[in-house]
Image (cartoon, rainbow, N blue to C red):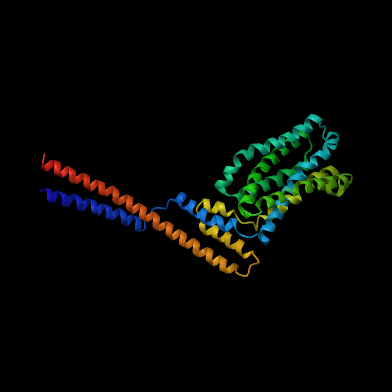
Amino acid sequence: MIAEYLIRETHGCCCCLKSKLTSVDGENEPLLDSQSESRTIIRKFQDKFEKSNYNFFHALMIFYFVLNIFATGLFFEMRAYLFTTLEKELGTTETINSTIVAAMSIGLASTSFFCGGLSDKFGRKPMYLVGFSGIVLFGSLVAFAESWPVLLLLHFLVGLFQGIQNPARSSIAAEFFPLKGRGAAIMMTRLGWPIGALCATGLQRFVHPISVPQLGMLGQGWRLCLFLSCFPAYTLLLVGLIWMPESPRYYIATGKYDKAFSVLSYLRMCSCRKDKQKMVDEDKKDLEFLLTSQSDKQKQAKWAATGEQHGVGIRSKISTACRRSFP
C-alpha cells in the first residue's frame, strides 16, 4: 500500500516537473530577467564605450552641443538688448520685462523637473525632437507678437520646451563621450553660450537699426532680431537629429541590445583605425557570447528552483504516507 502510494505520487510529481522544464525549453519559454541581464551587459559594454578613443563622430557631437548651447545663449541674451524697444513698441514696463524673463525661466524649471525621467522612458532623441520643435514654433512666433501678454505667453511656452531638451542634452553628452576627457569635452560645449551672446550683440548692432518693408512685420529691425535669434539655429539643430543615433545606454537599459550594438558599430566605423572592422567583429562575438551565457544561467537557475520546489513536495508526500500507514 505504501509502495503503491509513493509510486503514484512520485510519478505525478515527476510528470509535473517534466512539464515545467519543457515549458522552459519549449516555445512558451518565459522572458529572461531583463534587469539582471541588463546589469551584466552594461558592465560588459561600459568599458567598450568609456575606454574607446575619440574620433570624427565625437568631434561632430561636440560641434552639435556647442551649436545647441549657442542657440540657447543667443535666444536668451537677445532679450536684454530689446527691452527699451519693447517698451516703445508694445508698451511694456521694467516690471513686465522682468516678468517675461522670469516666465521663460519658470517654464524651463517646471519641465526640467520631470523630463529627465521621460527621457529614460521614451529615449533621449525623441525628447530632443519635441523640445526643438516647440522652440522653433513658439520662438519664431515671438517675432510676430503684437501685445506684451502674447509675448509673455510665448516666452513661457519656449521655456517649457527648453526644459524638455535640456535633460536630453546632458544625458547624451555624458553617455556618448568616452570617460577619458569627458569633462573637457563637456566643458568645451559651454563655449556656445558666450559665442551666442556675441552674436546677439552683432544682431543688435547691425540688424536692429534696419527696416525692410518687403518683409512685412519682419521688416522691423527688432522683430527680425527676435526671429533670427531662434529660427535658423534651432532649425539646423532639428536637421542634425537625422544623423544623430539614440543613446546606446538607453538601448541597453531597455533591453534593445541589437540596437545598442548597431550604435557601437557605428562609432567604431567612424574611427580612423585600420582594424576597426576587426573591432566590430570582436564586439559582435562578445555580445553573442554574453547573451548566450546569460540565457544558460537563467535557465539553470529556473531548473534548480523548480526541482527544489518539487523535491520538497515529494518529501512532504512521503512523510504524509508514512504517518497514515504507521500512526
Residue found at x 31% / y 55%? 21
Front-most of residues 153 and 196: 196
Check the image and name the residue furthest to the front. 180
Total tally of numbered discs in the picture: 0
Residue found at x 75% / y 32%? 99
Front-most of residues 79 and 168: 168
Whether residue 156 is visible to the viewer of this picture, yes or no, is: yes
Answer above or below: position of 182 versus 157.
below
Residue 305 in the figure: left or right of residue 133: left
Residue 77 in the figure: left or right of residue 125: right
Answer above or below: position of 109 versus 246.
above
Residue found at x 16% / y 50%? 6
Place of residue 107 in the rendered image (x, y in percent of width and height, measured from the top left): 68, 37
Find residue 201 and report its image quarter. Answer: top right
Place of residue 306 in the rendered image (x, y in percent of width and height, measured from the top left): 31, 50
Check the image and name the residue furthest to the bottom. 274
Place of residue 319 in the rendered image (x, y in percent of width and height, measured from the top left): 18, 44
Whether residue 211 is visible to the viewer of this picture, yes or no, is: no
Place of residue 137 in the rendered image (x, y in percent of width and height, measured from the top left): 71, 46
Residue found at x 55% / y 46%? 121
Front-most of residues 46 and 125: 46
Front-most of residues 113 and 91: 113
Quadrant, the C terminus: top left
Residue 326 in the figure: left or right of residue 312: left
